[in-house]
Image (tube, rainbow, N blue to C red):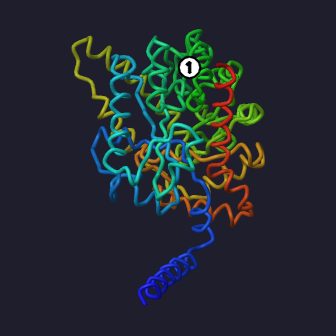
Amino acid sequence: MRSLLVAACTLALFAGHARADEALSPAQKLARAATIVDTHIDAPTELLKHWNDLGLDSPKVEFDYPRARQGGLDVAFMSIYTSPEQDKDGSAWQVASTQIDAVEAMVGRHPDKFAILRSPQDYTRLIDGGRVLLALGMENGAPIGDDLARLKQFHTRGVRYITLAHSHSNRIADGSYSLERPWKGVSPFGLQVIAEMNRLGIMVDVSHLSDDATRAALAASRAPVIASHSGLRHFTPDFERNLSDELALAIAKQGGVVQITFGNAFVDPKTAADTTAYFRARPEFDRARTDAVARGETPPSAEEFDKEWERTHPAQQVKIDAVLDQIDYAVKLLGADHVGIGSDFDGVSGALPEGLRSVGDYPNLIAGLQARGHKDEDIRKILGENLLRVWREVEKVAAAGK
């Protein structure tokens, strides 16, 4: 009698799951079945600004465990971001280390929900039980300082890609927003950094780099490179932060992948133009303010400048179609094997398209791609298979050189 009761309960449980699956849309079903890898989520920076338990509902931010599972997210690259100011004042190493501590603490609090992913070879083993796997991507090479040995230390802690520079040029490479470009590409030290990244198995990330720096990084790397969170300049003329067709094709030719980002500044021409204008105007303001202070005057503060800028450059309303257009164009230009996603969730102050506001919204992206005629096989590649392939190839290059 007891065995019959157990069997009946088991059948009822399976029937319940089947009914739940039947209620899902085709996009939701694919989100569950596919491997979704998002290469750029700025949760660690947000944690240092304002702590949240991201294993629980955290509606004030864009990444948390419940919405990640709702959206089908499997691998989230946590962005270990340091600013040019932290590079300048010498605190970048400390800030990066503290952010990695924060990611490790998330896993420590919720080992049933999160795990650190250090290699794509560990994916199948770690994903069991519905966990979201957290990989680490370092946005800005500033924490390396002048010490190549730090690359090994960061690799040991789980860092698997490094964006060589950020908004300003640094010791390694020139940044796309920077007015000062001392290296005309990548510095001699930067070439050593790339070689050591290849040796260790850390992906070289060219997002944020100037065009010349991107070309130099491609020429120097023995392994495929990635653009962890970039758009295509085809849609945003004169916005060097996005990739030209030439550079996107060069990344693909070398076996890499362009991870299309979601932020309005990268997919909307007006917002991109405003962003470019800001990065030109702000250094001029900073110089004028420094001169005014030296004369004994009391000029507006940087916060006041930013507030006035926001007033005179209101946020644009952008639809999900802007991201879909980018992916459409990237697939036609590069082929479906060289396109991925790097959202920039929690990194653009909520300036995101309608329908792509959090990690719970990947099914909306999938539905849009399906409606535009993309095959599920290609969508799976875009969602994560391409990035995992490149990651494996970077590991092979490292293994071959040891």
Above or below residue 154? Residue 353 is: below
Q: Residue furthest top?
A: 188
* Quarter of the rendering containing residue 2: bottom left
Find residue 100 and report its horizontal and vertical position in percent: 38, 34
* Quarter of the rendering containing residue 391: top right
Above or below residue 146? Residue 55 is: below
Viewer can see residue 82:
yes
The front one of 334 and 196 is 196
The front one of 397 and 259 is 397
The total of numbered circles placed on residues is: 1
Mark 1 is surrounded, within 10 Å at the Cα level, by few (under 14), some (14 to 19) or many (20 or more) other residues, namely many
- Left or right, 31 with respect to 255, comes to left
The front one of 196 and 297 is 196
Mark 1 highlights which residue? Answer: 174
Find residue 173 and report its horizontal and vertical position in percent: 56, 18
- Left or right, 152 with respect to 330, comes to left
Above or below residue 48? Residue 214 is: above
- As shown in the figure, which amino acid type bears the numbered disc 1? Asp
Quarter holding the N terminus is: bottom left
Find residue 132 and report its horizontal and vertical position in percent: 46, 52
Find residue 253 and report its horizontal and vertical position in percent: 78, 33
Viewer can see residue 263:
no
- Residue drawn 32% across the image and 16% down it: 290
- Residue drawn 53% across the image and 34% down it: 276
